[in-house]
Image: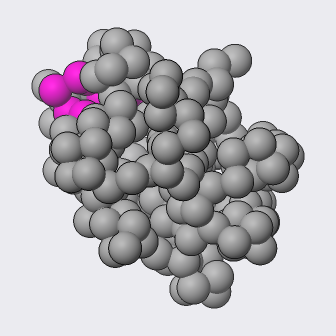
Amino acid sequence: MIALALMSPGLACAGPTLLVYGDSLSAAYGIGQKQGWVALLEERLRQKRIDYTVANASISGETSSGGASRIAAELARHRPRVTIVALGANDGLRGLPVAQLRDNLAAIVGAAQKSGSRVLLVGMRMPPNYGAKYTREFEQVYAEVARRRKAALVPFLLEGIAGRRDMFQDDNLHPTAAAQPILLENVWKGLAPLLK
């Protein structure tokens, strides 16, 4: 289990906390930690002089169920002003029920909002080999949860790299270091308005 804290020494008490709550796609799996999109986000915030401390509580292999079970503790620990929820890829890869994903995401987003955090929900899609019905319902869950919970939404974390073999590691699941700036741009579109 990998839980990361990307808080720079000396910045630990700086500004409000931005919590990234995801899986291996947000935990820089297979690449250097400083190459991952979350570290790139921290760097961008610093460059733009936007005073946030980034806490990355992403765990490789995490499902939405795992995320739902530990969200209360992470919220209590970090007290984030903004929370990025980027979970569900492992649910899809395991073919877990879409209704379960919906309930878990709604619980995570709801808990973050109840704690006073603004929430950005980051969507995921499954490849077509999971079947048209499953892939369609899976993708729609994110928009549905965001709409019901009035949360900001990035429809698809891997927009612009999905289907590009050169942007993925040998496992064809995890993006390369070269893909990380694209992931950051995808997230930034939804995140920037929440930081004001």
Asked whether, in this view, residue 169 is left or right of residue 166, the answer is: right
Residue 9, how many percent across, how many down? Answer: 49, 22
Residue 13, how many percent across, how many down? Answer: 57, 40
Asked whether, in this view, residue 62 is left or right of residue 72, the answer is: left
Assign the C terminus to one quadrant of the image.
bottom left
Task: Name above or below for residue 149 compared with residue 189.
Answer: below
Residue under the image location 56 percent in, 50 percent down = 17
Task: Name above or below for residue 190 compared with residue 86.
Answer: below
Q: Is residue 176 magenta?
A: yes
Q: Nearer the viewer, residue 152 or 19?
A: 19
Asked whether, in this view, residue 190 is left or right of residue 137, the answer is: left
Q: Nearer the viewer, residue 101 or 53?
A: 53
Residue under the image location 54 percent in, 54 percent down = 16
Residue 177, how many percent across, how many down? Answer: 23, 23
Assign the N terminus to one quadrant of the image.
top right
Q: Nearer the viewer, residue 125 or 86?
A: 86
Q: Quadrant of residue 123?
A: bottom left
Residue under the image location 35 percent in, 31 percent down = 39
Task: Name above or below for residue 169 compared with residue 74.
Answer: above
Q: Is residue 146 magenta?
A: no
Report whether residue 86 is seen: no
Q: Which residues are magenta?
A: 172-180
Residue under the image location 39 percent in, 18 percent down = 33
Protein image colouring? one colour
